[in-house]
Image (tube, rainbow, N blue to C red):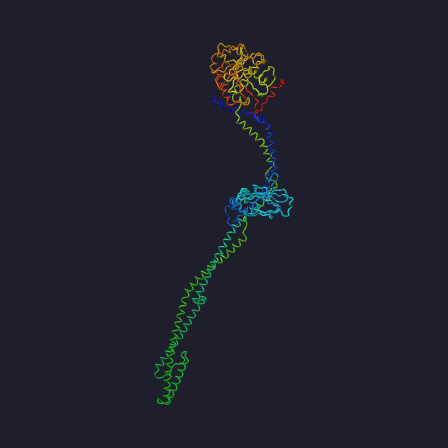
């Protein structure tokens, strides 16, 4: 139940946050805010004045679709979506290979700077002739050289400053050296360069390429656009624009080279195939020639027709010879069977003139014989001569026919052989035609392939010559007129905000980590039911520390007068005329309970009240130190220990201006304070003192360290519980709250000591306690 109440109370306290108090809490440290703000603004001015000017250079390109052409409508076409993958193009555009080519094209691994009094500015190039000797690929580590132009020559030093080369002229060609470059001011106005220092830096290509890769920013323009924006930040406008333009050229050339590479490889492949095709065509043509030569072919159709004609002609000749043979055999048969020497048939178609002439002579002799036989008889000598002549002609004719038949048969045999040869040739024509067609078909295939490759080669050559670009440059590299860094407004605004936030953050951390008590509000948040009856301001050591003068008008006097007045309000009302007992205690040592006890008793004494101050802190007495008494001066411990000792004998008067004020010191430090305080004599002391004094102020021991105070707490009419600002832990207030709630301390009220030692909460008592009184001289 109690925990629930505490939680509700804590929430109420958080809701009741006093914003005004929090603001005053920080405003108390306004000089630190002002100082921080001044320092921040001065730093911002110095930064804006001397920081390098960074400009942003950008360009815009459109990625051309390589697949444009006559295509069927697709989903991408219908919804107007491009086939270009901008993410892939972006990765290619920012790839290391592309960056490496840009670095090599512009020789970016060599950088130039001009050193100023405060700032070093990057240059695109040196304002005079510069020739790099070292090859870019041979640069393995970064190095830099300073070129100092003096009145009489040049002085070049490396980055470490341990090697220096001086030249008596304004060029490095006049002297042998190991520098990786040559410099020549030439006919330049040397007076314009005297006193200036330039710096040349060499870096490895790999490092420069990676650095450029990190600086290039490529981003699409819109979601449905094919445009890309390329940007870079740098000091030199010209150098940044050259980098962007070269990057676009390299990227475009890379895409063109990729497409040209296909055409080049196509041409190379076709050229290689041409060699083999030419060899194969030559082989086929040679084989065709040899085939025709072996088979005596000119043209298969002409040769076939000629073979048929020769065969027909040969058959006609055979027919004619066969006819002559038949006629010759028939005539020979007639000659053999003609025993009576009759006439022979003439002109029957024999193509032999000698035989036809013998037949004609034979028939003429037969006719002459028949005429002579009819006129002269068989025995006529002319008839005998004619018969003899007939027999001779018959024999000659028979011999001629035999020879003619033999001749015809020989011719017949030759013609039949030739006819068979012609028939064989004609029969072989289909097979030869088939073989020749196979050869022609191979030749036609190779020729067609050769022509196709020749056509493709021409197409590849045309594509190679007119390869379309990869990109369209929408905007060449442009640089804004105003630098993007430093932005003076942003810098000053940031400095202003930072100048306020830094002290605020430091104070916030200090306040956050601060666990000390500072003001009355800290007590009321933890113990709202216990009243705070006084706030004692912090008094410096060199000022008045004790309320010695009853008529004093000091801050100390007024604060304790207020405290004494407030104490009266918490004391119980009684009409017995006895004095009031007021305990002054604290949680731990050092919170100022003795200081408050003394001054509270003096404040009450200053209004003509009889006051007795008792030092009841037997373990660590401190009152004697303020009245210049010894530590062993008899006091309370002596009275409590010795029954024969009178407490009145131990009283001392520590302050001359307070005649009604008496003090009972603690006395000798005993070994058993708790036993002495509970032996009954302290109660007797209080009862007797109440009869003689108006107020008994008891300086007791700290409550958290020992139980002495709780042992005698029932004798008090009021308990003043002291807490010291900037000293007492806030968590310790819970202990005092428990003492009050459990009744271990009666009628408890808080007094805050040393308020104003820390001005975190904005309290100052210089005006409050002096108002209307004036200073005490």
Q: Nearer the viewer, residue 357 or 552?
A: 552
From the viewer's perspective, is residue 366 above or below residue 694?
below
Q: Is residue 240 above or below residue 297?
A: above
* In this view, 75 is above or below 596: below
Nearer to us in this view, 425 or 205: 205
Q: Residue 604 placed where, x, y %? A: 57, 14
Tell me if residue 673 can be seen: no
User: Which of 167/516 is in front?
Assistant: 167
Q: Where residue 534 appears, x then y in whole percent?
A: 56, 18
Q: Is residue 332 visible?
A: yes
> Number of numbered discs present?
0
Q: Quadrant of residue 46?
A: top right
Q: Nearer the viewer, residue 348 or 634?
A: 634
The quadrant in which residue 555 appears is top right
Looking at the rendered image, the quarter that the C terminus falls into is top right
Residue 305 place in picture, x, y as percent: 44, 68
Q: Residue at x 52, y 55 (%)?
A: 461
Identified at 61% across, 39% down, the residue is 117
Q: Quadrant of residue 627?
A: top right
Residue 178: x, y in percent?
56, 46
């Amino acid at each position: 139940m109690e925990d629930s109440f505490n939680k509700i109370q804590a929430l109420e306290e958080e809701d009741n946050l006093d914003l005004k108090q929090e603001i005053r809490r920080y405003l108390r440290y306004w000089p630190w805010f002002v100082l921080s703000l001044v320092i921040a603004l001065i730093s911002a001015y110095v930064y804006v004045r001397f920081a390098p000017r960074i400009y942003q250079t950008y360009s815009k390109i459109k990625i051309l679709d390589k697949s444009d052409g006559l295509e069927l409508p697709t989903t991408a076409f219908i919804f107007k979506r491009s086939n270009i993958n901008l993410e892939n193009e972006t990765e290619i555009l920012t790839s290391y290979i592309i960056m490496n080519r840009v670095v090599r094209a512009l020789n970016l691994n060599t950088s130039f700077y001009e050193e100023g009094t405060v700032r070093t500015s990057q240059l695109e190039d040196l304002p005079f002739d510069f020739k790099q000797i070292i090859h870019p690929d041979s640069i393995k580590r970064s190095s830099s050289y300073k070129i100092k132009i003096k009145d009489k020559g040049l002085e070049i030093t490396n980055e470490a400053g341990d090697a220096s080369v001086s030249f008596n002229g304004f060029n490095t060609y006049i002297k042998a050296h190991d520098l990786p470059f040559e410099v020549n001011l030439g006919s330049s106005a040397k007076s314009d360069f005297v006193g200036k220092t330039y710096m040349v830096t060499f870096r490895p290509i790999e490092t420069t390429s990676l650095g450029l890769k990190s600086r290039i920013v490529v981003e699409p323009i819109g979601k449905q656009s094919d445009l890309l924006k390329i940007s870079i930040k740098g000091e030199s406008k010209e150098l940044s624009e050259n980098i962007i333009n070269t990057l676009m050229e390299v990227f475009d050339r890379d895409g063109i080279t990729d497409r040209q590479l296909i055409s080049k490889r196509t041409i190379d492949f076709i050229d290689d195939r041409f060699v083999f095709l030419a060899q194969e065509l030559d082989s086929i043509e040679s084989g065709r020639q040899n085939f025709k030569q072996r088979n005596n072919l000119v043209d298969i159709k002409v040769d076939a027709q000629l073979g048929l004609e020769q065969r027909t002609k040969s058959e006609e000749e055979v027919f004619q010879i066969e006819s002559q043979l038949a006629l010759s055999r028939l005539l020979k048969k007639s000659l053999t069977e003609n025993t009576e020497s009759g006439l022979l048939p003439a002109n029957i178609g024999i193509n032999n003139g000698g035989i036809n002439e013998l037949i004609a002579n034979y028939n003429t002799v037969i006719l002459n014989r028949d005429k002579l036989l009819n006129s002269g008889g068989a025995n006529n000598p002319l008839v005998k001569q004619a018969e003899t002549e007939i027999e001779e002609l018959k024999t000659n004719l028979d011999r001629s026919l035999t020879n003619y038949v033999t001749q015809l048969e020989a011719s017949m045999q030759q013609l039949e052989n030739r006819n068979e040869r012609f028939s064989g040739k004609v029969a072989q024509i289909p097979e030869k035609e088939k073989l020749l067609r196979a050869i022609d078909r191979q030749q036609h295939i190779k020729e067609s392939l050769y022509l196709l490759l020749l056509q493709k080669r021409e197409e590849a050559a045309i594509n190679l010559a007119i390869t379309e670009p990869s990109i369209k440059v929408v905007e060449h590299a442009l640089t804004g007129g105003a630098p993007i860094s430093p932005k003076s407004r942003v810098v000053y605004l940031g400095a202003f905000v930072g100048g306020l936030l830094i002290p605020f953050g430091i104070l916030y951390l200090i306040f956050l980590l601060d666990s000390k008590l500072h003001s009355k509000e800290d007590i009321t948040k933890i113990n709202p039911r216990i009243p705070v009856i006084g706030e004692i301001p912090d008094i410096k050591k060199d000022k008045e520390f004790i309320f010695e003068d009853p008529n004093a008008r000091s801050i100390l006097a007024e604060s304790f007068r207020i405290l004494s007045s407030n104490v009266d309000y918490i004391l119980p009302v009684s009409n017995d005329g006895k004095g009031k007992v007021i305990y002054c205690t604290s949680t731990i040592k050092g919170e100022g309970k003795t200081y408050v006890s003394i001054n509270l008793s003096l404040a009450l004494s200053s209004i003509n009240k009889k006051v007795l101050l008792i030092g009841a802190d037997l373990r660590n007495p401190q009152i004697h130190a303020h009245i210049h008494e010894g530590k062993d001066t008899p006091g309370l411990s002596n009275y409590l220990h010795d029954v024969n000792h009178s407490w009145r004998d131990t009283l001392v008067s520590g302050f001359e201006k307070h005649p009604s004020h008496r003090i009972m010191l603690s006395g000798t430090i005993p070994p058993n304070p708790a036993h002495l305080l509970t032996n009954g004599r302290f109660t007797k002391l209080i009862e007797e003192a109440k009869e003689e004094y108006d107020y008994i102020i008891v300086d007791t021991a700290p409550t958290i360290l020992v139980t002495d105070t709780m042992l005698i707490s029932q004798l008090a009419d009021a308990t003043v519980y002291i807490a010291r600002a900037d000293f007492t832990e806030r968590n310790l207030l819970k202990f005092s709250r428990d003492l009050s709630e459990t009744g271990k301390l009666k009628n408890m009220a808080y007094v805050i000591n040393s308020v104003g030692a820390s001005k975190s909460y904005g309290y100052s008592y210089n005006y409050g306690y002096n108002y209307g009184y004036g200073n005490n001289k």
